[in-house]
Each structure stands twice: as structure tokens, then as C-alpha cells.
Image (tube, helix red, strand yellow):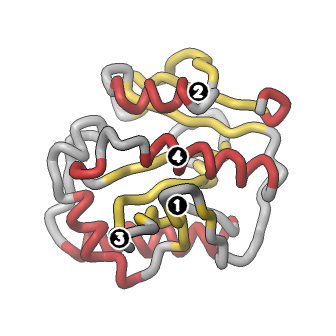
Amino acid sequence: MQYKMEMNITIETKRLILRPIKKNDAKDFFELDSNPEVHIYLGKKPVKTIEESQKMIDDILQQYKEFGIGRLAMINKTTNEFIGWSGLKYERNLRKEFNYYDVGYRLKEQFWGKGYATEAALASINFGFNDLKLKEIGAAAELDHIASNTILNKIGMKYSGTFVHDNTQLNWYTIMKSDW
């Protein structure tokens, strides 16, 4: 089931504001996704041009229109810095056998290891269950991506096996509203 809603969503946590992504976030997206370290577990294909970042933003804006939900910009409340993105996405490509609501996050390297991804992911799951009334949320992480697998476990997601996408084996996690 798909839930359409206006994309005027703002989620606040102790340290973060999660807000809709805007076209003028392209410079920050480029800084994030042109870093090869950020893409070690994302197919090792960092973006090379700002146009690629603009296309990513256009894809997110299209998700907002089609599904009423999509990734959100992660902003530091104190400094107003763009840290990365997080949030829910209606995922139609990763698992060929079914579509699902996915929780995800991607941060600029200088913000790794500070708990921002965990904080944003918890807020996103809470929003999904309490505001969107979802029954289940999924997530995937490469087997060797220790940080992401640790976060998914820490936020209460349950390991549910592995699957292959683009010749890469991924761990699959789910969380049910009834377990939240």
C-alpha cells in the first residue's frame, strides 16, 4: 500500500532536523557523493559531476510526488550544516521480488561515528510507524559494512537473511510495528 501525503514533513530530534530535500542541496549532495570513501559499500561509483547530484535530487523529488515520502536532508540543529540524508523511501528496485518501505542514511565522512545516522534512523522509523501507519519497514546493508549493520541492529531491526543485488550479497533487516 502506498501513502500519499504532502512533503512538508519536518522531523526534529535532539540534534537534527530532517527536512525535505531541495534543488539547492546539490552542492552538498555532490560533496557527499563524490567522496570515494562514502561509496565503498555503494558499488564504488562516486559521482563525478554536479549534474549527477542534481539528477539524484530530481529522483527524490519525484518520489515525493509519486509516494508522498522520500529521503530527507539531515541538518545539524546547532550549526545548520547539511550532514547527509536519512529517512524512508518506497523501494522498488533493490528487492526484485517485492516493494517495501526502506529506512536509510548517508552521511558526509566528517560526520561518521557521531551517532547521527542512528538518531535519524530511529526518528524515521518512529515517523513511519506512528505517522504513516506502516506495518513493516525494511533495510539492507552489505555484509562487510560493519557500521551500517551495527546501526540497523542498534535501532531494533531484525536480521532476516541475505540476498544478492548487482552481484553483491546484502544483509536484509526488517522491523514490524508490533515490535516497535
Q: Residue at x 32, y 38 (%)?
A: 113
Q: Spatial distance from mark 1 to mark 3, Cα to Cα? A: 21 Å
Residue type indicated by callout 3: Thr
Q: Is residue 64 left or right of residue 3?
A: left
- Residue 37: image location, x then y, percent: 17, 43
Q: Which residue is mark 2?
A: 173
Residue type indicated by callout 2: Tyr
Tell me whether the residue at label 3 lies in contact with that at label 4, contact meaning CB atoms closer than 8 angstroms.
no
Mark toward the viewer: 4 or 2: 4
Q: Residue at x 62, y 50 (%)?
A: 123
Q: Spatial distance from mark 1 to mark 2, Cα to Cα? A: 18 Å
- Residue 153: quarter of image: top right
Q: Is residue 53 above or below residue 33?
A: below
- Residue 174: image location, x then y, percent: 65, 29
- Residue 20: quarter of image: bottom right
Q: Which residue is mark 4?
A: 119
Q: Which residue is mark 3?
A: 79
- Residue 18: image location, x then y, percent: 54, 65
Q: Answer with mark 1 or mark 4, whichever residue precedes in sequence.
A: 1
Q: Which residue is mark 1?
A: 71
Tell me whether the residue at label 1 lies in contact with that at label 2, contact meaning CB atoms closer than 8 angstroms.
no
Q: Spatial distance from mark 4 to mark 2, Cα to Cα? A: 18 Å
